[in-house]
Amino acid sequence: MEVLPELPAVTKNILEEHMQSIGVETHDDLRFVEEADLMTILRPVQARKLLSVWKQKYKNATQLGGTPENSSLSSEASPDQSLSLISVSPQSSSSTSSSSPQLDTHWEDNFEIPWTKFPEELMQPLERGKRPGPKLRRQMVRFVVTEMMEKCPHVDIIEGDIVGTGYHSLVKHLQNRIENVRRTSTPKIRKRKHESNSDDTDEIPLEERAAMQDTYGCIKWNVQFLPREETQESQQQKMEKLKEMFQQSDANPEEVKGPMKSTFYTQHQHVNQGKSIKCLREDWPFLFDEIGMSVHFKELTGINLKETFIRNLDLKGKSLLNYLTTVCVKKNKKFLQTYARLQRMRGQQSGCSEDVKEMVLLLLSYFDEKEESIFFYVDETSLAEDVQLEQVSLTPAIIVCGNLDQTLINTNIPSFISAFCLMFGSYYCFNIHYPSELASTLEFLQRCFFTINPEKGTKVENKNSKRRLNLNPRVLTLIQEITDHEWCDT
């Protein structure tokens, strides 16, 4: 067992020569070495480790009635013998190794899945490239964890007591790692330094001062420089041009996208500086329009807002609705009542927008979250200017139009899907945190339908000091239940 495995070979050779220079000729002489003799070569802790092992080795040898090795430490000794100064043979360190076994710290690099231990019913779907059922997956995890425990038998212990089976945290880590690998990778997000004094914030970079909820899911939250071909003057000119184009009813969308993209730097600088929604709407009216927000959202997150949502609706919407309307209705009476109410309201209406409305409302019911936090109902005859904004939540909401900071931002949205995408995009484009009463619904939609999957952080507002998990457990549970439901149907 190597005493100082991290010691470079060159240092080992120097140590050997140094020991010979101070008069150490045999292993028996090692017991006379003091810490001060080693300080020119080793750090204090390294020296103490080495001395401790040498003394223990001499003590073990004398207790067994033998004598320490008297082999020469001369330069003629073989390489294996010369290194024995900082090594301990298995026989001489039996008592130490039994009490604190040394493990291969890189065992995971050579770890092999125990395929031969898997039962036939588990191997059958695996060999065919199919997903095993929940029971078989749990069994597979147990086999793998048991094998891992043999390689690294560190159990969950608190004050000497084993917690539960002792390896729950290992199982959870294994599960989390699998989920992380399967999710799309995005740039890591730096958290704000909470220990910083408020007086020092001007000297701290903007991204470090920002709440983690602001930067969550963004790849260009704090752009440092203007585009190479741009200046402050050109940005101002394009801002004025965009204002003029917004007044034109026949503005060409393609002509809007170019200047919106090239002025992204200034737009988000204004957002990060904390300008009010009213000011932002005056300076950047297209930022509150479907065309402009889509451009800004794509630059900010790298994701096409509406296109991504519609694509995922086609891929996942039917499966989600099927699970909610065939499985969840049987599990929860309150959910069943919500579903019945929605069916009465929908009547004979059909179409994609109606399906999306039903999906969102059923998700809210599934997570037991507040419907009024997203939807504010007014009379059908109400005009936009008739809406009592003081009754509307401060976070993005859908009335007949979108709403932010109790300021109407768009009164002419063509469809529910467009309105919903604008509402969701507002959380990112304007640095708004998910309200805690919508935490699960918004994160589920974010991960499954907008494919924003950061490995760390959260978009949920932090009303207390309680730490939130990076992946909402309720969201993960629903995802797994839907997957299992699909597997059972195939």
Image: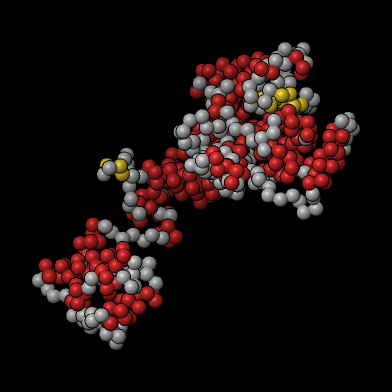
* Quadrant showing the C terminus: top right
Residue 46 place in picture, x, y as percent: 31, 66
Nearest the eye: 198 or 99: 198
Nearest the eye: 228 or 110: 228
Question: What residue is at 13 percent from the left and 75 percent from the top?
Answer: 67
Question: What residue is at 60 percent from the left and 49 percent from the top?
Answer: 187
- Vertically, is 116 above or below 377? below
Q: Quadrant of residue 362?
A: top right
- Vertically, is 189 above or below 103? above
* Quadrant showing the N terminus: bottom left
Residue 56 place in picture, x, y as percent: 19, 66
The residue lying furthest to the left in this view is: 65
Residue 482 appears in the picture as rendered: no
Nearest the eye: 418 or 82: 82
Question: What residue is at 38 percent from the left and 42 percent from the top?
Answer: 168
The residue lying furthest to the front in this view is: 199
In the displayed structure, does residue 150 sit left or right of residue 131? left
In the displayed structure, does residue 54 sit left or right of residue 388? left
Residue 271 appears in the picture as rendered: yes
Q: Quadrant of residue 400?
A: top right
Residue 475 place in picture, x, y as percent: 53, 34
> How many numbered discs, if any?
0
Residue 263 place in picture, x, y as percent: 77, 43
Q: What scheme was used to colour the molecule?
A: secondary structure
Question: What residue is at 58 percent from the left and 28 percent from the top?
Answer: 435
